[in-house]
Amino acid sequence: NLIKSKRFSDCWKEYTQEIKRGVYKSENTTTGYLTKGRLLVDFFKSKSVGKLNYDDLQNYLIWRVDNSLGKGNRSRKIQRETLMGDIRVFSKFDTWLVDKGYRLKKLRNLEKKLKSILGNKEDTSRLYFNRDEYQKLLTISKKRIKKSQGGGLDGGRKTTYQRKLLHQFIIFGVNTGIRVGGMLNLKWEDVQLRDKKNDYVAKGIEKRYGKDFFTSLDRYYTVNNVKDKTGVHTNIGMGGSYFALEKIKKIKEEYYGKSELRTDYIFNVKSFSSGFNTLLEESNLKYKKEGDKYKRRDAVSLRHTYIVFQIQNNISEFIIGKNVGTSGKMIYENYTKNLKTLELVDRLTNVNSESQRKSRLVLIK
């Protein structure tokens, strides 16, 4: 029987308790649900779940947009994908409500029904940086850091710190392929900075490493315990990720005057979207024309860049997929299959060339 008197806040509390106990399975992380849930509860509060309709959700989205605008220079309109995240969480919750008998039927086709608020989806699919573009991004990033060190309206100690951290965030992302949310979730206790020489010694094998730049890249790596929207998985980061983490330690020690605790978040920011967006604009890399359409880059492009670089280095789709928390089939369907034939032939026939080896320089500089 339908219990029409059930309040939204009471149902949400029951729902999240079941998720935490593992009674009700969810593809989203518990943290993500709780964050979105607080917003949903703030708006719907004591409203009867049995009476929820499309107009209620539309009013919720309007409320979200209005409350995101803020005041002054920090005013920034909420992104469409953020609103879609809210809708996805509500949709999962709505399914649970129907299963429990608290509602008669689900609200379906939410994206279509709420299009007047959500607008059209901007195409950011699988857009990566080629090696020259990536080098340009890092070059402009370093110029921005130097500029902020001069103080004035575009600078100051805090701005310099934020830009330095963003610079290493970019390097870490391209050297690991971890999703943006997964990187922001990382704590120092989730990462291991590893030296292959010590790994070999532990197995009774003595291996010598030179001191040149490329040998250092091959010698060091990271092991990252990643928690993102798909769950938990282990990621192996290339040498650039090792040096990025070492640099972040120094940046934070200089800024805070103390060493990081293992329980501290590595990046300890809610988002890099504002700074990264500005960097893309100053680098003239935010948009790229493909065919007759323009696609927009964002921080997710760092993950796409890692995947494409690894494909170009002749690493199998299965290994790449396992390392970044997805399937080899997805890698093939969305990346390998779409690489230009000439580009793919060139990469496959020049994998061990001197020019290919030197191109790895862009991964950490």
Image (tube, rainbow, N blue to C red):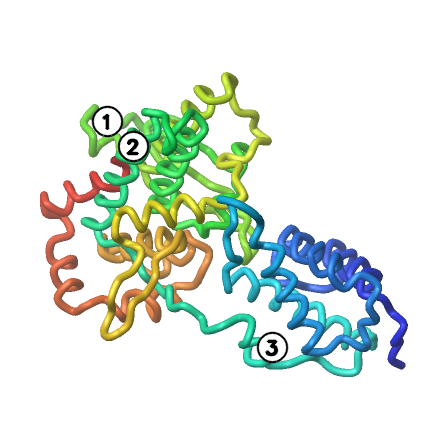
Q: Nearer the viewer, residue 199 or 155?
A: 155
Q: CA distance from mark 3 to mark 2?
A: 50 Å
Q: Give the labeled residue for mark 2.
A: 219
* Amino acid type, callout 3: Leu
Mark 2 burial class by Cα count in 10 Å: few <14, some 14-19, many 20+: some
Rendered image quadrant of residue 140: top left
Q: Position of residue 232 (x, y in %)?
A: 55, 51
Residue 94 vertical position relative to residue 35 in the rendered view, above or below = below
Q: Quadrant of the N terminus?
A: bottom right
Residue 265 figure quarter: top right
- The residue under label 3 is 110
Residue at which label 1 appears: 209
Q: Which mark is residue 140?
A: none
Label 3, label 1: how many angstroms apart (C-alpha)? 57 Å
Q: Is residue 115 above or below residue 140?
A: below
Residue drawn 56% across the image and 66% down it: 84
Q: Please give the name of the residue rendered at 61% of the width and 63% of the height, measured from the top-left corner.
A: 86
